[in-house]
Image: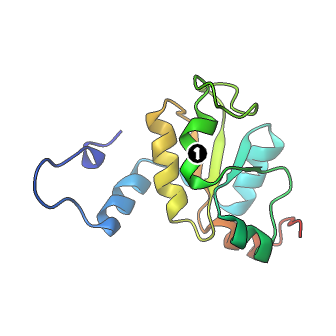
């Protein structure tokens, strides 16, 4: 993990744009087709959007829905509250939000838990839908 994401100590921290850039520097972000291929190969797509967005826009078939505030507990393979799909630290996980911002930070958080193959979907759900990939309504 990049030293840029480690605390800077007392005083002003980094701006959110800097935090996002540092997070993304350590990720191999995937496009929609690549994320679909990970899912087909047995990896896990994780939708962290809140309910109103899922109701408005639909969902990705087969994606695990875990709202952002529960993500670490549900995806940590060592946690008693983990989802059944959280089978181990080698699991390929692709997190997505609506447009691909919060998911970058979420993927880094999962990496800190030891999920070394965690990454996010560049452009989020909106990019998935724009690519014409399946959506359940």
User: Observer-nearest residue: 2 or 54?
Assistant: 54
Q: Residue at x 65, y 64 (%)?
A: 50
Q: How is the image coloured?
A: rainbow
SS assignment at label 1: helix
Q: Position of residue 89 (x, y in %)?
A: 59, 26
Q: Is residue 116 left or right of residue 13?
A: right
Q: Is residue 53 above or below residue 43?
A: below
User: Observer-nearest residue: 54 or 19?
Assistant: 54
Instruction: Specify the farthest residue to the left.
Output: 11
**Mark 1 crowdedness (10 Å alpha carbons): few <14, some 14-19, many ≥20:** many
Q: Position of residue 26 (x, y in %)?
A: 42, 47
Q: Position of residue 42 (x, y in %)?
A: 79, 37
Q: Is residue 78 above or below residue 45?
A: above
Name the residue beneath numbered marker 1.
71
Q: Residue at x 71, y 34 (%)?
A: 83
Q: Residue at x 25, y 42 (%)?
A: 3
Residue 57 figure quarter: bottom right
């Amino acid at each position: 993990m990049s030293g840029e994401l480690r605390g800077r100590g007392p005083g002003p921290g980094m701006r959110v744009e800097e935090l996002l850039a540092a997070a993304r520097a350590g990720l191999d972000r995937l496009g929609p087709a690549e994320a679909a291929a990970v899912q087909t190969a047995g990896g896990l797509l994780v939708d962290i959007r809140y309910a109103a967005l899922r109701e408005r826009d639909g969902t990705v078939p087969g994606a695990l829905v875990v709202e952002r505030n529960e993500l670490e507990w549900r995806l940590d393979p060592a946690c008693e509250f983990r989802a059944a799909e959280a089978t181990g630290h080698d699991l390929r996980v692709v997190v997505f939000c609506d447009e691909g911002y919060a998911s970058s930070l979420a993927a880094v958080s999962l990496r800190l838990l030891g999920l070394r193959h965690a990454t996010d979907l560049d452009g989020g759900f909106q990019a998935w839908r724009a690519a014409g990939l399946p959506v359940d309504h």
